[in-house]
Amino acid sequence: MNIFVLLRLAPDTVEELEIGGDGKSLDADILRFKPNDPDEHAVEEAVLLKEKHGGTVTVAALETPEVDDILYTALAKGADRAVKLTGDLGAAQSEAAARLLAGFLKAGGPALAPDTLILLRSQSIDDLEGEVGPYLAEALGLPYACVVTQVAPAGGAVKVTREFSGGLRGEFTLPLPAVLGIQSAEKPPRYVPIAKVRAAMKTARIETVDAGAVEQPARVGVERMYKPEAAGRAVMIEGAPEEVADKVVELLSKNSVI
């Protein structure tokens, strides 16, 4: 199979986030970027498929601070090719990003190879609805499945397992080429020692492809951002279980909850 993994880096929410001087965006000078957890799982699922069934894995990402480190890490994990998409990407919201990625995937011709499988995250820190996947599938005219937890080739198709609310799962068969939104890989993402990543930096290279400029106008604009304010309303209740229960009932009644 010819597997593509499309990564998206997002601000690391473990770090303290600050609002920039314009009041509409995060302060880029102190941001640290990282892959979303489902992105890590998409890379792992691609490498697992390659190890089990053969093929090649190409990892691509729009240019973002620290993206080189992430791409070299993917190469150290087993990817065969890493691509950084550059250009005027500052205003690339979900639909525009999907069009840029579709342009990259169709660079070799209007039709993708029949054994092409495209993996990306089901959602990200700054895209909880996972909009890029369905936008991309629509732009390419391909079938799409999201919240995928298992993938297996089935002739000229792939059999996937999807998660649903309530602990339900469903199995679906999609013809190739196809786009899948990965929720989790069949195994946890592998750890790669820093030494192996540094070795990849010396022996491998990252291709740079001009993705062009964002032509799709932004559909959502930010008027102003605010930091959460501490309300100081937490109440610590101590005492025996019976005393705590009485106080909880009293508080709920006082606040018209019961």
Image (cartoon, rainbow, N blue to C red):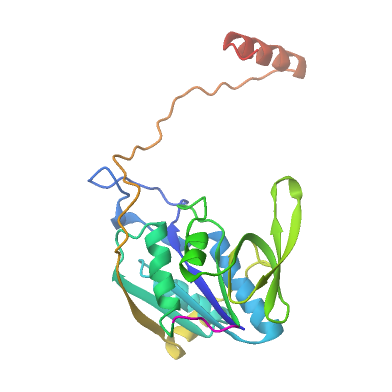
The image position of residue 61, as x and y in percent, is: 43, 71
Residue positioned most to the bottom: 203
Residue 204 place in picture, x, y as percent: 45, 88
- Looking at the rendering, the stretch of residues picked out in magenta corresponds to 110-114
Specify whether residue 164 is painted magenta: no
Give the quarter of the figure containing the N terminus. bottom right
Q: Is residue 98 above or below residue 83?
A: above
Q: Is residue 113 magenta?
A: yes
Quarter placement of the C terminus? top right
Residue 221 position in % (x across, y down): 31, 46
- Residue ID at (70%, 84%): 53
Residue 8 point in image, percent of width and height: 45, 64
Horizontal side of residue 256 vs 163, given as left or right: left
**Image mark count:** 0
- Please say whether residue 186 is visible from this viewpoint: no
**257 and 2: which one is in front?**
2
Q: Residue at x 29, y 57 (%)?
A: 29
Q: Name the residue located 66 percent from the left edge and 20 percent from the top edge.
A: 238
| Dominant secondary structure, magenta | loop
| Res 142 visible | yes
Does 98 sit left or right of 44 as displayed?
A: left
Residue at 34% of width from left, 37% of height from top? 226
Q: Is residue 221 left or right of residue 172?
A: left
Write down the quadrant of residue 2 in the picture. bottom right
238 or 167, nearer to the observer = 167
